[in-house]
Image (cartoon, rainbow, N blue to C red):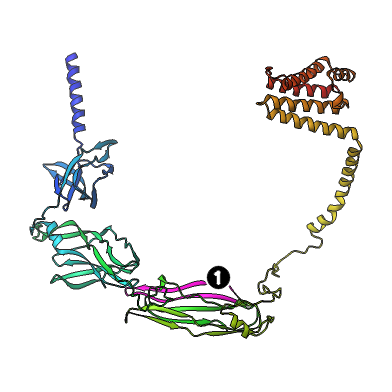
Amino acid sequence: MKKLRSIVLVLVALCGFSGWAQVQFNASASKEKLGINERVRIDFQMNQDGDNFSPPDFDGFRVVGGPNQSVSNTYINGKKTYSKTFSYFLSPMSRGNFTIGQATVEIDGEIYKTLPLKIEVTAAVDVPKDGNNAEYVASENVHLVAEVSKRDPYLNEAITVTYKLYVSEDVSVTRAWREIDIPKYADFWSQIKENRQRRVFEGKFKGRNYRYVILKTAILYPQKTGELNIEPLVLDVPVEVLSNKRDFFGRRLTTTVNQTVAAGNLTIDVKPLPEQGKPANFTGAVGDFKFNISASRNQVDANESLEIRVQAEGDGNLKLFNLPELTLPSSLEVYDPKRVDNVKTTSNGMSGSIATVYTVVPQFKGTYPVQPLRFSYFDLATETYKTIVSDGTVITVENGPVSTETASTENNTNSGGTKNIIQTGDQFKYIKLKSSLKPISSSQFFKSPLYWSLMGGPLLLIPIFIVAGRKRKERLADAEGQRKRKADRLVKKYLSEAKKNLGQPALFYESLERALHNYLRAKLRIETTEMSKEKIAQMLDEKGAEEAAKTNFIGLLQSCELARYASGISTNVAADYEKATEVVTQLDKQL
């Protein structure tokens, strides 16, 4: 029986081990050594379906493809074989030795892990020019190009960078590509216009026929002079390449590889604007512009508002410069101006208009000329500076108070003189501070609950005021009660002060002695000069105080005197404070 039992246990163990060994979860790499310009494929394969698959972090690599999932079910001699694979395509970020960590998956409630993989990344290697190599074919037939409209612009002159993806007729791109690295456009004002339509064009690249799509266009305005660098755009593109293998019907099979393409670094040599002929009022406008000043109304009354608009329109760096400021007579009240932009950005740069709008409120009757303004810009067509002088305008205030000076004198003082203005007191009359709005539906106040409350409320308060007045008179007439209440307040004050000074015996006993003296003055009508311990004991006996309370009170006075005048005597401050509170409470009940 023992031998049979041993055999059964061995069989059970072997069956359990066999069942455990049926689950396989492995990791494999397409190559263990590769150049920094190559890629590696990592496969995580399991022979049973699992849940919660978790890949490693892939430190040192950039994931350029995947995860691609494939499932295989085969039957050989009636035996079913299952395989599920997760594939990742990795591009190394630097040279060195790296470890692909463990992936995990849950199968039948158990967690399984793969073994780590060692990958060595060396310097760049020559990609074999093998027509049968799918990666080589993809690299030769897919290109990303950045076309620059101008490589030597002036400062603040618009340039465009157009990104085109060229694909030859030998390969195809059927799935969306992914941006790996996006340019930051440092030292440029930039706006990106994405091409959502993705229309396919026919063209040539390096003498060969290609199809291409325009991915995006970057409109750039350089903000610095000298050589500026534009970082490359990098894409991961899934490319389908025809292989030499054929299917059952003789058609060639395709292989999908992920190709990394980059537009390359661009260098822009930005020229500074010429100093010769630069106007003093030049604020950085570059392009082709028109300039004018206009008023919403030329005839108003005093305290009526109007708007004066200073506007520049045309093509150029409209968002990158300021308009000249408008100067008006001081008798015209001017609010803070607001900027109004109506600018659109196309592949050729900015176009539209910008304006500064001034809200003006005249205070006095008269005629106020608005002086012309000068606006200067750099014309790219002629490469020279141009200045536009706007037309002036006149604001006529027909009705209103008259200032002490005539309008002609005011015009002369606009150049820098000063003048006195009479304030009428209603210069803010145009601002309505109170409205006369009424609700559409409102209840009547007469005979409403609020009406009767306001009428009857004062009558109900009369008895309360009478009773309160009598109580106050009685309280004021009770001189003895007032004196006791005042003494009680002082006792509480000094006892509270003594409690705060528990950590400082000298201050504590000084406050405690004042509290006890004030208590005696209130209860025994005894002055401070008469407060000998014998006198206090006699008066406490006359008032009927108990012997224990009298003894404790006299003892507290002695403790205060010893602590104040005999330094070095040990005292118990906390115990004396508790005793004082207890004694005062007892005497209050007995006296």
| Near-viewer residue (35 or 561) | 561
Task: Name the quadrant of the C terminus.
Answer: top right
Q: Main secondary structure of the magenta part?
A: strand
Q: Amino acid at mark 1?
A: Asp
In the rendered picture of this protein, how many numbered marks are placed on residues?
A: 1
| Near-viewer residue (187 or 12) | 187
Examine the image and state in which quarter residue 265 appears. bottom left
**Left or right of residue 146, residue 394 in this image:** right
Badge 1 marks a residue whose secondary structure is loop
Q: Is residue 182 above or below residue 273?
A: above
Residue that appears at 76% across and 31% down: 492
> What residue did someone put label 1 on?
336
Q: Is residue 95 above or below residue 482?
A: below
Residue that appears at 13% across and 72% down: 207
- Per the image, is 337 magenta? yes
The span shown in magenta is: 333-360
* Residue 176 in picture, x, y percent from top left: 25, 61
* Residue 377 in picture, x, y percent from top left: 39, 78
**Left or right of residue 423, residue 290 in this image:** left
